[in-house]
Image (tube, helix red, strand yellow):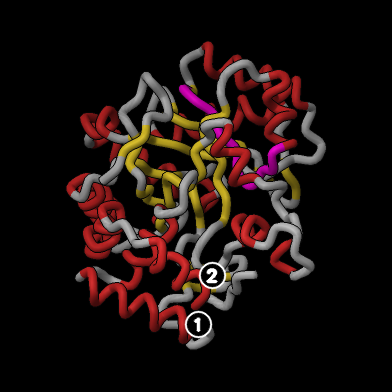
Amino acid sequence: MNYIEISPKSVKASGIVIGCMRIGSLGRKEIQALAESALDAGINTFDHADIYGGGKCEELFGSLLAEKPELREKIFLQSKCGIREGYYDFSGEHILKSVDGILKRLRTDYLDLLILHRPDILMEAEETADAMHTLKEAGKVREFGVSNMNPMQIELIKKYYKGKIAVNQLQFSAAHTCIIDEGVNVNMASGGGQMRSGSVLDYCRINDIVIQSWSSLQYGFFEGTFLENEKYPELNGVLGMLAEKYGVTNAAVAIAWILRCPGIRQTVVGTTSAGRIGQLAKAADLRLTRKEWYEIYLSAGNSLP
């Protein structure tokens, strides 16, 4: 497992992150098994958001931490705020209130990372930054990140926030490749050459902002997994061939493909199966060749100029 220092005050964060959006359907023992299986596999990072399950997912995970407080210092715990019913809200008042709710539900005194959840076009960046400074000075949040933001949106926050923007969460998978298509097709008239993200991948690499991929095994906007999906026969054929070659699952190859891309140093996986975690963790130690990486990219329906 590879690890990254996101906050000097926290444990290093694993390259594979357990997404907790779906744990609301699990029982108490299942959540404990999920967390312990992750830690046994070297995965110590858990991703939440205040909207997941209407707060229930954080409450359930917080119950585990209350019963097993020794786990807190072993894990890197992150959550997100800013999405409300029908709109986004990066007002200082909402951010401060949201974090207090997150900490209460998670039964912890601090977050290792707070991520601002999708861009709020009505954001007053100075007010947002003031809330960020307040939370950091109070010790409630150690570092901050953003999600789904382009370079200029991040620069606007950085104009007023004097700490670092540590992370940008972006949708990326073998079947959702927008952030690299624009780089592959520079100066081409093809659809892939359209500038959709403002070269966010290169921007984050230049500014040492860790990219966390989400929907790492999905296509579209929560349309489902591409694994064993009849819409992606060629992709699954290549994944299966490489899985057999390396003695891992198709899912592990798909995750390894993401982590092979420089700048994308973490990937969020949403499994609720403790039994699958060990297989997914093998992706962190699998380094695909350059030829294999491009073969997967092309098999998903992409082309090279």
Left or right position of 186 against 135: right
Marks 1/2 in contact by CB < 8 Å: the verdict is yes
Q: Mark 2 points at which residue?
A: 175
Residue 203 or residue 122, whichever sits in front: 203
- What crowding class fits label 1: few (fewer than 14 Cα within 10 Å), some (14-19), or many (20 or more)? some
Q: Quadrant of residue 23?
A: bottom left
Q: Which residue is located at x 65 percent, y 39 percent?
A: 82
SS label for mark 1: loop
Quick check: can you spot residue 25? no
Whether residue 305 is situated above or below residue 124 in the rendered picture: below
Residue at the limit of the structure toward the right, as seen here: 122
Q: How many discs appear?
A: 2
Q: Quadrant of the C terminus?
A: bottom right
Residue 179 or residue 65, whichever sits in front: 179
Residue at the limit of the structure toward the left, as seen here: 40
Q: Name the residue under label 1.
A: 232
